[in-house]
Amino acid sequence: MNTPPPPTITPAADAAFSPARPRDADTTRQALLAAARRRFALDGYAATTVRVIAADAGVNVALINRYFSSKEGLFEACLAHVGRELDRQDAEPSSLTQIIETIIHQVADSPSGEQSLQLLMLLRSSGDERADLIRRNTLQRFAERMAATSGWPAGRSGDDRVLRAQLAISAAMGMVLLRSSTGLEPLTSATVDDLAGPLGEVLGVLLGVPPGTAVPPRA
Amino acid sequence: MNTPPPPTITPAADAAFSPARPRDADTTRQALLAAARRRFALDGYAATTVRVIAADAGVNVALINRYFSSKEGLFEACLAHVGRELDRQDAEPSSLTQIIETIIHQVADSPSGEQSLQLLMLLRSSGDERADLIRRNTLQRFAERMAATSGWPAGRSGDDRVLRAQLAISAAMGMVLLRSSTGLEPLTSATVDDLAGPLGEVLGVLLGVPPGTAVPPRA
DNA sequence: CCGTTGTGTAAACAATTGCTGACTTGAGGT
DNA sequence: ACCTCAAGTCAGCAATTGTTTACACAACGG
C-alpha cells in the first residue's frame, strides 16, 4: 500500500526516549489511551494505525492488544472515556447561560486541545456496532440534558427541544471539525473572543434564550 | 488485517449485473466518480477501498488507476466535481433569504442524498496536500460569496463577516455529518419542515437577517 | 476479411495492516 | 539470593491494501 503519511497535525508526543520507563501497567494504559484519543479524533479511525499510536505513547505495539484486546477495543475505551468525561463535566444542574458558556469554552479551545478532541471523537466511527452504540448513547444523554435545561416556554414539544439541542451540538461539532481538519481562515485562527459572540447567538437561538437576555459577549 | 466491513449505509448500487455494458469510457468514468463520491463522503477516504468503489460502479478495479491514476487522483476528481457543482449552484447573485433557502434544502435533503454528499465531501481528507488545497479553496470561495451577500450593516468588518459565514457553513455541515454518521434521533429522521425553522434562525443570526425579517418558517 | 486501437478483465505484485506467539527483562516477596 | 510472575520486546504471520502487468474482447477502418 502507499497511503500517504497520516495527516498528523501533531508530530506526536516525542516519546522517543524515556531513559527508564517504570514498569507500570496503568501508566502505559493511560499513555495509550491519550495517544489513541488524539489520533482517532484528529485523523479518524481507519487512517490511524496501531503502530503510530504505540509510537506516540512510546510503547510496544503488542501492548495495545494486551490491554485492549484489539484496535476496536482501544477505540471503544477512548469513546467510553469521552462519555464519562462529558457526563462529569456537566453533572451538577446549571443554568442555560452556564451551559452555553461551557460549550463555548469547549469548542473555542485550541482545535487540537483536549476539549475539542472529546467532541471530535464523537464524530469518528469505526464501523463497529458496539462502538457506534456507545457514541450514540453519549450524544443522546448530552442532548437530552441540554434540552432539559433549555429555556423554552411551554407550548414547545419535548421532541422539538431535543431536536434543537441536537442541532446545537451539531453546530458546535461542525465548527470544531472544520477548524481542525481544514486550515480555513479566519475560522481556524479565531480566538475565543472572536467566536464567543456568534457562537453564543447561535446557541441562544437554538436553546431558547429569551430575546432580551443578551448572551455574555465574551468570556 | 481485519478491519470490519465498511460502515456502508447504502449497500451500494446493485451493479451486480449489467447484461452488456456498452464500452464507453466516459460512462464508466462517471460511474466511478459517482460511486467514489458516495463512499468517500459517507465512509471517509481511508475507510474506503478501491475495490469497493469499483464494485459499486460495476467495473474492474484497474480502471480506477487507468482513468484517475490513483486512489488519490480519484479523490481529487471527486473534490473538483463538488467544487464545480457548488460554484454552479449559486452562480447568479441572489438575495440573502434565497441563499438561506438554498442551504436549508441542501442540508435538509436526505442525509445520503446527492446534496448532502457534496457537503460531506468537503469534510473528508485524504492527507494529501493538493487535495486539501482544493478543498480549502472551495470552502473559501463558498464562504466569501456568502459573506458578500450577508445582510450586515456597515460597522462590521469584512473579516467578521467571513468568519460568520464560515460558522454558518460549519453549522450546516455539522448537522449533515451528525445525521449521516450517527443514527441520532430525532435529528436523523427529521424532515425538511422540522429543520427549516431552527436552521433558518441559526443562519439568520449568523448572516445578519434584520430582526424583523422572519425567515420563511417552511419551504 | 484482418489488424489496430481503445476498453475491460484477470492475476499477481510489494507494501502495510492488525494481531499473535515465544522470548526477555525487571520488580517484589520470602 | 532466588524465584515468580507481570510487563515489555521481538519477529513473524495471514489478510488486505493500492497498483501494475499481461492478456482478452469489441468496435471500426482499410
Image: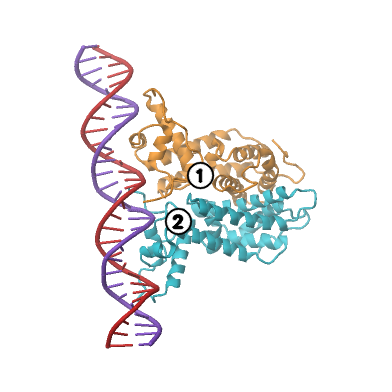
Chain colours: A cyan, B orange, C purple, D red
Q: CA distance from mark 1 to mark 2?
A: 27 Å
Residue A60, percent across and down? 35, 65
Which element is circle 1 on? loop
Residue receiving disc 2: A72
The quarter holding residue B53 reads top left
**Which amino acid type is marked by label 1?**
Leu
Residue A30: give x, y in percent of width and height. Answer: 46, 68
A191, B200: nearer the viewer: B200
Residue lying furthest right in this view? A154
Same chain for labels 1 and 2? Say yes or no. Answer: no
Q: Which residue is mark 1?
A: B122
- B144 to A90, vertically: above or below: above
Above or below residue A167? Residue A218 is below
Give residue D19's position: percent from left, percent from top. Answer: 31, 41
Q: Residues within 10 Å of mark 2 (few under 14, many from 20)?
A: some
Going 74% across and 58% down the picture, which residue do you hit?
A214
Query: Tags 1 and 2 in contact by the CB under 8 Å rule?
Result: no
Q: How many residues crowd around disc 1 within 10 Å: few (fewer than 14), some, or many (20 or more)?
A: many
Q: Indicate the amino acid at tag 2.
A: Glu
> Which image quarter is the C terminus of chain B in?
top right
Left-right relation of B32 to C14: right
From the viewer's perspective, is the residue at label 1 or at label 2 nearer? 2
Let me know if residue B70 appears in the view: yes
Circle 2: element type? helix
In terms of depth relative to the viewer, which is nearer, B180 or B30? B180
Residue B47 spot, x, y in % from top left: 43, 47
Residue drawn at the location 49% of the way across and 57% of the way down: A41
Q: Is residue A190 left or right of residue B197?
A: left
| Number of on-image labels | 2
In this image, B77 relative to A187: left or right?
left
Which residue is at 47% across, 58% downward?
Answer: A75
Decide if residue B155 is in sight here.
Answer: no
